[in-house]
Image (cartoon, coloured by chain):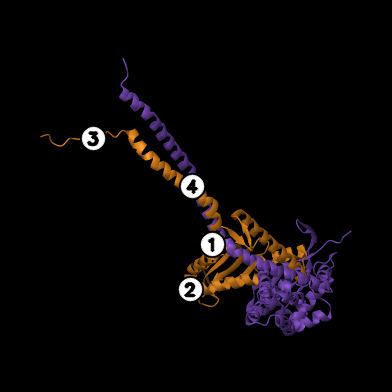
Chain colours: A orange, B purple
């Protein structure tokens, strides 16, 4: 009696594999491309329609409309200012802005006093004898001395100059010479003379 | 020798199958290649829609603001037609005068010195020294004349403050001039938020002469607050009217000097700016102050 007949194994050539997948692949590609085209033509426009006040826009036209609105708003604000504000002389406006752009001498002096108060609690320890402020160059020259605190005068001077340098309004400090002298009246003190420039 | 019929049949069947396979694979490749840009198109459109979302929120707000501004402009145009007098005329005559006549300014400085000497906050007010007048050409705004002048005075602390106030105010004409641009913007925003038609009440308020305002602050404030009665408006106006220049105006003109300046027709002051200040400490709380100022005007037209 013969045993079961052995079926010879089918040889899968590459072409045979391709032949098998070609039809399903073609169907898949058709369905995918067809769906994408349908989505692009029908679904996307409906889902992403940008409607403003009843009319539809795309992004570039929406941006253009937004810019146009901003421009019209700016023009309306300018026109309103012209009608409401009493003076529009450009020279006067420029002179006012120039004047306001620079801090007054009192403001600068107050700032120096505040720094002095922060550095040392002793009243008049940071003694500013003379101040010269040139507004066009925003340059301030300060002369004085650190007194009434004994041998710490140079340390306090250094702290004062450092605090001044750290102020955001100060662009540059030309530091002083650090010396300590003895005065028969006020005792040990550190005279200083330096300048700084405001932003 | 004849070909094997079986192999001939195989070849005949195989050829159409081969062509079909190739054709199907070719079409698949073409369709898949086509779908790539369509997918890219989807990504782009969805990204644009996402970017457009903030605009969809902003645009209606901007449109409402646009409409409100147009209404305010319309109302203001009608109101402007009925307005009389012009601060700009006073500007050209007194604040930036033509021709370099300093009589009013010098008269004011003398009055200032006398008033505050009597008050005991300054002394040794020197004569005013005049420098050489020069002409400057401001690119955007045309020619102007600059007159340097210097004065020296010994002051107490309050004297230094009134001198600072004087320089800051010299050339300021109306309440609008005394307010910073951001303060003016706040006022306009308040009209839009609370009462757009109230813009017409804002115009006479901002045009109020600064000296007149110092003399009768309450009545001017009460008048404007009628158009903006809310608590927020009250708080905003109170805050704005405490601005530095308005405080300086009260300090300088709130007393004897204000009345004298009006009586002698020395207001408004010519535009002054500080070029240089020197401040030296003296005993007893006094300071020696040297001020180098610039008085501005326009060259006389030929």
Whether callout 2 and callout 4 share a subunit is answered yes
Which one is closest to the eye, mark 2 or mark 4?
Answer: 4
Which one is closest to the eye, mark 1 or mark 3?
Answer: 3
- Which of the 4 image quadrants contains residue B173? bottom right
Q: Position of residue B12 (x, y in %)?
A: 37, 27
Which one is closest to the eye, mark 4 or mark 1?
Answer: 4
Classify mark 1: helix, strand or loop: loop
Mark 2 and mark 4: span between their CA atoms?
Answer: 92 Å
First in residue order: circle 3 vs circle 4: 3
Kindly identify which numbered label has been placed on residue A34: 4
Classify mark 4: helix, strand or loop: helix
Whether callout 4 and callout 1 share a subunit is answered yes
Q: Residue furthest right?
A: B302
Identify the residue position indicated by label 1 in the image.
A177
User: Which of the chains bears the disc numbered 4?
Assistant: A
Whether callout 3 and callout 4 share a subunit is answered yes
Mark 2 and mark 1: span between their CA atoms?
Answer: 18 Å
Q: Position of residue B37 (x, y in %)?
A: 50, 45
Whether callout 2 and callout 1 share a subunit is answered yes
Q: Residue at x 77, y 59 (%)?
A: B141
Q: Residues within 10 Å of mark 2 (few under 14, many from 20)?
A: some
Q: Residue at x 80, y 72 (%)?
A: B78
First in residue order: circle 1 vs circle 3: 3
Classify mark 2: helix, strand or loop: helix
Q: Residue furthest top?
A: B1
User: Which of the chains bears the disc numbered 3?
Assistant: A
Identify the residue position indicated by label 3 in the image.
A9
- Which of the 4 image quadrants contains residue A174? bottom right
Q: Position of residue A48 (x, y in %)?
A: 55, 57
Identify the residue position indicated by label 2 in the image.
A150
Residue A94 or B116: which is nearer the viewer? A94
Label pair 2/3, CB-CB below 8 angstroms = no
């Amino acid at each position: 009696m013969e045993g079961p007949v052995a079926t010879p194994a089918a040889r899968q050539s590459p072409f045979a594999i391709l032949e098998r997948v070609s039809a399903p692949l073609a169907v898949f590609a058709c369905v995918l491309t067809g769906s994408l085209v349908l989505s692009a033509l029908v679904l996307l426009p409906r889902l992403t329609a940008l409607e403003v006040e009843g009319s539809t826009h795309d992004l570039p036209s929406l941006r253009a409309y937004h810019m146009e609105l901003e421009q019209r708003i700016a023009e309306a604000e300018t026109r309103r200012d012209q009608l409401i504000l009493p003076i529009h002389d450009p020279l006067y406006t420029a002179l006012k802005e120039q004047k306001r752009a620079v801090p007054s001498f009192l403001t600068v002096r107050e700032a120096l006093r505040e720094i002095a108060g922060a550095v040392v609690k002793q009243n008049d320890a940071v003694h500013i004898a003379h101040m010269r402020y040139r507004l066009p160059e925003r340059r301030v020259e300060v002369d004085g001395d650190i007194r009434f605190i004994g041998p710490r005068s140079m340390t306090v001077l250094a702290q004062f100059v450092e605090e001044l340098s750290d102020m955001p309004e100060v662009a540059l400090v030309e530091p002083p010479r650090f010396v300590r002298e003895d005065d028969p009246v006020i005792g040990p003190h550190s005279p200083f003379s330096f300048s700084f420039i405001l932003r | 020798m004849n070909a094997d019929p079986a192999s001939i049949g195989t070849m005949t069947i195989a050829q159409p199958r081969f062509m079909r396979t190739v054709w199907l694979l070719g079409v698949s490749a073409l369709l898949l290649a086509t779908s790539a840009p369509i997918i890219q198109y989807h990504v782009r459109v969805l990204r644009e829609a996402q970017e457009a979302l903030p605009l969809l929120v902003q645009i209606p707000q901007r449109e409402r603001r646009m409409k409100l501004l147009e209404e305010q402009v319309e109302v203001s145009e009608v109101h402007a037609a009925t307005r009389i007098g012009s601060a700009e005329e006073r500007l050209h005559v007194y604040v930036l005068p033509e021709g370099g006549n300093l009589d009013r300014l010098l008269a004011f400085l003398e009055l200032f010195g006398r008033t505050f000497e009597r008050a005991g906050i300054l002394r040794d007010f020197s004569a005013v020294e005049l420098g050489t007048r020069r002409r400057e050409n401001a690119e955007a705004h045309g020619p102007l004349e600059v007159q340097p002048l210097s004065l020296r005075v010994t002051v107490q602390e309050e004297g230094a403050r009134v001198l600072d106030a004087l320089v800051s105010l010299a050339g300021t004409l109306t309440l609008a001039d005394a307010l910073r641009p951001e303060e003016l913007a706040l006022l306009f925003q308040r009209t839009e938020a609370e009462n757009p038609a109230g813009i017409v009440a804002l115009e006479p308020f901002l045009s109020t002469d600064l000296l007149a305002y110092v003399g009768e602050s309450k009545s001017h404030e009460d008048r404007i607050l009628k158009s903006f009665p809310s608590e927020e408006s009250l708080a905003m106006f109170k805050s704005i009217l405490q601005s530095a220049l308005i405080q300086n105006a009260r300090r300088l003109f709130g007393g004897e000097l204000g009345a004298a300046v009006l009586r002698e027709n020395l207001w408004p002051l010519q535009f002054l700016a500080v070029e240089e200040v020197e401040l030296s400490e003296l005993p007893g709380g006094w300071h020696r102050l040297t001020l180098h100022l610039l008085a501005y005007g326009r060259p006389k037209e030929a």
